Image (tube, grey):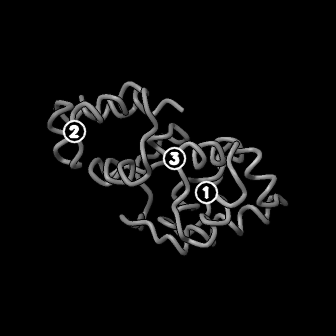
Amino acid sequence: MNIGLKLKELRIANNLTQEELANLINISRIQYNQYENNYVNIPIKHLINISNFYDVSLDYLFNFTNIKQYDNLKKEIDKIKAGERLKNWRKKNKLTQVKLASILNTTFSSIAFNEKGRNIIATPFLYTICYKYKVSAEYLLGRIDNPKYYN
């Protein structure tokens, strides 16, 4: 997952310093620098803030598409809807919670918490699902209504 390069491109294209962008999304410059240099994974909540600030989709940030924005993209994540989408997607792909947890190298209880809407799926897990199965992050998170699949 190499989101850092896309973050840097967007920041430079918008004539912002790391400090300015970090302040806009309410994190430290050091923390933002770690995201831009791929030293740490970006939590979904920060990725959503960055996506909303630049008015681009997560799919664009993940380099799954060159389309920057989708029609009717919701700014927030509905945890319940995201959980239902993940569960429906998992079942459609004939995966048990245990099998999906194995693919993502996590516990099935983590998947269960995501599907119940208790937690939002972690960024690396979301990325892995979307990359491997060619499905939109925005769809799985409930920010768009129509499923999008990639080649």
Q: Position of residue 78 (x, y in %)?
A: 47, 71
| Mark 3 surroundings within 10 Å by alpha-carbon count, few (fewer than 14), some (14 through 19), many (20 or more) | some
Tell me if residue 9 comes above or below residue 71 in the rendering. Answer: above
Residue nearest the observer in this picture, 21 or 148? 21
Residue at 58% over, 61% down: 140
Residue 127 in the figure: left or right of residue 57: right
Considering the numbered disc 3 on the image, is that residue within a helix, a strand or a loop? Answer: helix
Q: Position of residue 110 (x, y in %)?
A: 64, 58
**CA distance for labels 1 and 2:** 34 Å
Residue nearest the observer in this picture, 106 or 57? 106
**Residue kind at label 2, given as amino acid type:** Ser
The numbered mark, 1 or 3, whose residue comes first in the sequence reads: 3
**CA distance for labels 2 and 3:** 19 Å
Task: Answer with the quarter of the image where residue 16 lies.
Answer: top left
Query: Of discs 1 and 2, which sits in the foreground?
Result: 2
Residue at 79% over, 64% down: 92
Residue 2 in the figure: left or right of residue 88: left
| Mark 2 surroundings within 10 Å by alpha-carbon count, few (fewer than 14), some (14 through 19), many (20 or more) | some
Quarter of the image with the N terminus in it: top right
Query: Of discs 1 and 3, which sits in the foreground?
Result: 3
The numbered mark, 2 or 3, whose residue comes first in the sequence reads: 2
**Residue kind at label 3, given as amino acid type:** Thr
Question: Which residue is under mark 2?
Answer: 28
Question: Which residue is under mark 1?
Answer: 148
Quarter of the image with the C terminus in it: top right
Question: Which residue is under mark 3?
Answer: 123
Q: Position of residue 148 (x, y in %)?
A: 61, 57
**Residue kind at label 1, given as amino acid type:** Lys
